[in-house]
Image: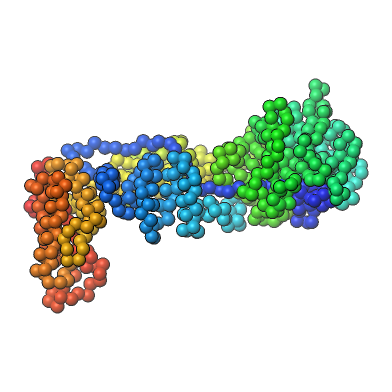
Amino acid sequence: MNFLNHELKTANKIGVSKTHKIICILAFSLIFSMGYSQRGKIRQASKEYDNLAYLKTSEILLEVAENGFTSVDLLQKLANSFYFNNQMKDAAKWYGELMKMDVDGIDPEYYFRYAQSLKSIENYDESDKWMKKFAAEDRSDLRGRAFSSTVDYLSMIDEASREFEVYNLDINSEVSDFGSTQYKDQLIFASSRGGGKKYKWNEQPYLDLFSANKQDDGSYDNVTKLDSDINTKYHESTVAFTPDDQVMYFTRNNYYNKKYRNSEDGTNRLKLFKATLNDNGNWDDIEPVHFNSDEYSVAHPTVNVQGTKMYFASDMNGTLGKSDIFEVDINEDGSLGDPVNLGASVNTEGHETFPFINSEGDLYLSSNGFSGLGGLDVFVIRDFENKRALNQPMSLENVGRPINSPMDDFGYYENLGTKEGFFTSNRDGGKGDDDIYSFTIPECEQVLEGTVKDKETMELLSGAVVTLFDGEGNQLQQMTVGSDGSYKFEGLACEMEFLVRGEKETYASDEKRFTTPKKKQKLEIELLLEKDVVALEPCADLAKILDIPIIYFDFDKYDIRYDAEVELQKVLAVMNKYPTITIDVRSHTDCRGPASYNERLSDNRAQSTRQYLIDKGVAAERLTAKGYGESRLVNDCGCEPTNDSSCSEAEHQLNRRSEFIVTSINGQKCPEN
């Protein structure tokens, strides 16, 4: 690619091609964030409990925690109950309490959930801290790796690749053609086909700007050189227009008012020029932009759809590598502000060049500083302008095949309105040096489908409500599943983050985050809901319902320890919530040790447990208590007559248990009592 080649071979070059051609090329990179924010408020299922016969365990856990009695297990379950119901403020509160406990070996998923809940309340700094901890804990997790900007680039490129055709335009010549931009019904591009003085570096004529008219069938023809005020005997290339089509920015050698100027080291640099459309439809009032210099190059402009920003490539002072991407404000009066380097999160020590900003604020560029297929590859940062304005993390993605190849691929341009796309490549099979390729932007919609099931029984849950949200937590679609438990959502956009949630009364919600791929396909996600409401009936064991395996005491003692008090607070909450319930407290041991000792010790512990609840306000007549020692083993781990057993410690543990049996509720008694 001539103009961009020699220009920086003899001018401190703005880009490098794989075939030793230096191309005025500049691109960028930003940091990705898998993390997303859920701000929408979701309807939470509720149920009127008939005759106080239902117990919602999450309510009990909240009451216990708010009374100051906490444990790791309790806080995990409580925070999760809010997280999965999208009550992020409360989730952040209780995950925060969990993190204060500083427990070793905690599942790193809790760091991730905490980070996401913090984002929902706009505490981004704290969220980033926990995302970093999450990434450090499990470096294989894609979310953490994305946050840390560490990727398996080949597999990522394969994922990004899409199946569509690219076409070598008929207007390409045997020399260099590149850098296409649309202007009304024309395609504007640079080419060496113009004849005239040849460029010594490649023996092709200097580059000029040309236009080609769009035909009824969508092809381009009738190639014409732009007027002589724009084109000179030196290089012109890469054009950008303001949204009103009245102003054009373009790249040219340092040649103005018929004066050709070199830098102190004898290099003729690249500069940006501005032209204005006059009443006769011609470009005039050509002038250089104020930040040009004889000592560095400025090239390859692109203007955003609002006409407020221009992005370009340069190797000016402060550039991090061979060339960087810069931005500059376009003021209301048409003047330009001062350039700003997009910084280390965007630019590398290599070449970043040929920026293009599309109508949605996605920033495309070419680079050899990031891992790619070879030479210059085209990359994109989705939603770049919004994320930059909000100072949010960004991710740079390789756009994959067929745009990229083992050769140089650059000069990306797309029109989302007409679904037309263009790029330049010197890949094998072309007509000349660099050729312009076109493609139709493929439609890409996903179908999401799946089933909702009971997690324990795997029974299909008819009547469950399934809701689809975008990555920000905004509700998009919702449906109630039928008897087959299935749901289906159509029309999901590609390369977007979504969340799907299943809900049903008496169940805890389940949700899955996912990002749609770049290839059109069906996605299947199964939602598994756990029972959150348990029927309270005579003979029910609150220990099983509230997950209380045993009330622990210190060795040979029966005073209430703090960890036992946390568990007893759960029982106390039930007793207070349902005043008709009566409970029999039962304490059991394993077979080891003398039977008489085990019976006496377990009875003392059962009585201590009963007294604790009485001291907390439960009427004594609602509580009975008894220790059973080793007389009611739940397995074959008996020790008689040798007072020994071949059972494992885990098997003995099953016999060391506490029971809180509902002896009556609402006047209905347990038959065994």
Q: Quadrant of residue 644?
A: bottom left
Q: Estimate the x, y position of residue 19 in percent, counting from the top left.
A: 78, 56
Q: Is residue 12 above or below residue 244?
A: below
Q: Estimate the x, y position of residue 187 in percent, counting from the top left.
A: 75, 36
Q: Which residue is drawn at 79% across and 50% down?
A: 13
Q: Is residue 548 above or below residue 62?
A: below
Q: Quadrant of residue 666?
A: top left
Q: Residue at x 42, y 44 (%)?
A: 117
Residue 282 vs residue 65: left or right? right
Q: Estimate the x, y position of residue 575 in percent, counting from the top left.
A: 17, 45
Kindly give the residue lying farthest to the bottom in the view shown: 642
Q: How many marks?
A: 0
Q: Which colour scheme is used?
A: rainbow
Q: Which of 178 and 9 is in front in this view?
A: 9
The answer to whether one can see residue 157 in this image is yes
The answer to whether one can see residue 194 in this image is no
Q: Residue at x 75, y 56 (%)?
A: 18
Kindly give the residue lying farthest to the top in the view shown: 279
Q: Quadrant of residue 372?
A: bottom right
Q: Residue at x 67, y 52 (%)?
A: 348
Q: Estimate the x, y position of residue 515 in percent, counting from the top left.
A: 51, 46
Residue 207 vs residue 38: left or right? right
